[in-house]
Amino acid sequence: MAKPFEKSVRYITEFLKSLAPDAKVQQVPEFTFRIDLHDDRTEVRFDRSEMEDFEVALGRFKNTNYFHTLDNRIRFRIFIAMGAKGLIPDLQISSELLREKGEWLKNLRTDVAFDRDFCAVLYKGLTLLSASIKNTLASGLPLPEVEAEKDTVDNLKRFYE
Amino acid sequence: MENLSYLKAAAVCVIMEKEKAKQEADIPRIRKALDAEIYSIVSGIRDDPFRDIKLPEAIHDYAIQQGPGNTPKRPKYVREAVPDEEQSKLDKLLDHLDPRLRRRREGAWEALRSDNPDRLSQAANSMVELLDQVITQVCKDTELATFLTRKYQTHQKTEWVDATRKWIRETKDNLHSAKHHVDHQSEQLTKALLTTAESILLIILE
């Protein structure tokens, strides 16, 4: 009898091995993957509904934005579990974030509040981004959309100051 | 929503800063601590409300402004590196014939995913060489058309293989002349060439 979610399990296992070829990867009940590398251990858990959706997407929707969205949920869970323990030191996670494909939200209106540490991260990042947009504007060319970006970023920066 | 997009980009800027610091750090424990910080931020932007928010154009400009050393490169692994079912089947058949052939198939895809300016042409050349080697080894002194007609007792597959090999050769030559100029269409053509060549290999070897 075929194992449940055979394609997804194989995909996840091979993905883990491609990230850390020397790691020992083991599936422990039910949809948890245990990764042992040198003296470190980490686990990545998925729930049944995620495995169900991914199994269908692997069979029928490969190369669609829907597939990329599910694929990213799986992959980034793995990146975070392994990365936080320093198990994928050579991976440049920013490149994964910049190349990310998927179904993006078209509309969202929500109130957000972040903790102090994350607000500090955002402020620092907004400062870097604002300086970068300023560099782009230094070309002297008329770039109204970039000017609008600078206003938005600077307003956010003032908020997180 | 626009604000969330810029906030997400701000977090990515900090991640890139920390990656730069990690590159410069020699001490393993410092690199590990930086990794913990980096992935804590990643965890924040992979959660609501940021997860399904598209990054703005400004972050790509930021990456370019960081210079080639800091422009995110394709990682050594890519998700396409996980072979699909057909490729796994083909790998087993190639292994049976000569294990070096499987490596060549993987090498073609690796070339495609590399940063080499000539990557499309190299990927196409590798796959065409693999196809030629397999045909030589399997068909020996028999013509491919004769081999396939005998194998499948029909002309349909033979005609498709003949026409497709011709397309592969022409596409490969065109890619060669478009060396050092990678556009989206050429990239898609190369992927199609690699995938189609794998289909021919399966027909020959199955």
Image (cartoon, coloured by chain):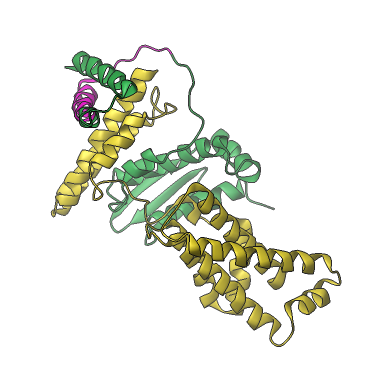
Looking at the image, residue B190 lies above or below residue A138: below
- Does residue A125 show up? yes
Viewer-side residue, B57 vs A67: B57
Q: Residue at x 55, y 68 (%)?
A: B127
Q: Which chain is green?
A: A
Viewer-side residue, B31 vs B115: B115
Task: List the single residue furthest toward the bottom.
Answer: B141
Q: Quadrant of residue B142?
A: bottom right
Left or right position of A7 against B5: right
Q: Quadrant of residue B50?
A: top left
Q: Residue at x 39, y 45 (%)?
A: A43
Q: Quadrant of residue B94?
A: bottom right
Q: Residue at x 18, y 26 (%)?
A: A127
Question: Where residue A140 appears, x then y in whole percent?
Answer: 23, 28
Q: Is residue B8 magenta?
A: no
Question: Where residue A145 appears, x then y in whole percent?
Answer: 34, 22
- Does residue A114 show up? no
- Residue span colored magenta: A109-131
Q: How many marks?
A: 0
Chain B's colour is yellow
Looking at the image, residue B29 lies above or below residue B122: above
Left or right position of A124 against B7: left
Question: Where residue B109 appears, x then y in whole percent?
Answer: 49, 61
Viewer-side residue, A132 vs B138: A132
Looking at the image, residue A94 lies above or below residue B171: above
Left or right position of B130 against A125: right
What main secondary structure does the magenta stretch of the protein show?
A: helix
Question: Where residue B131 appears, x then y in whole percent?
Answer: 61, 72
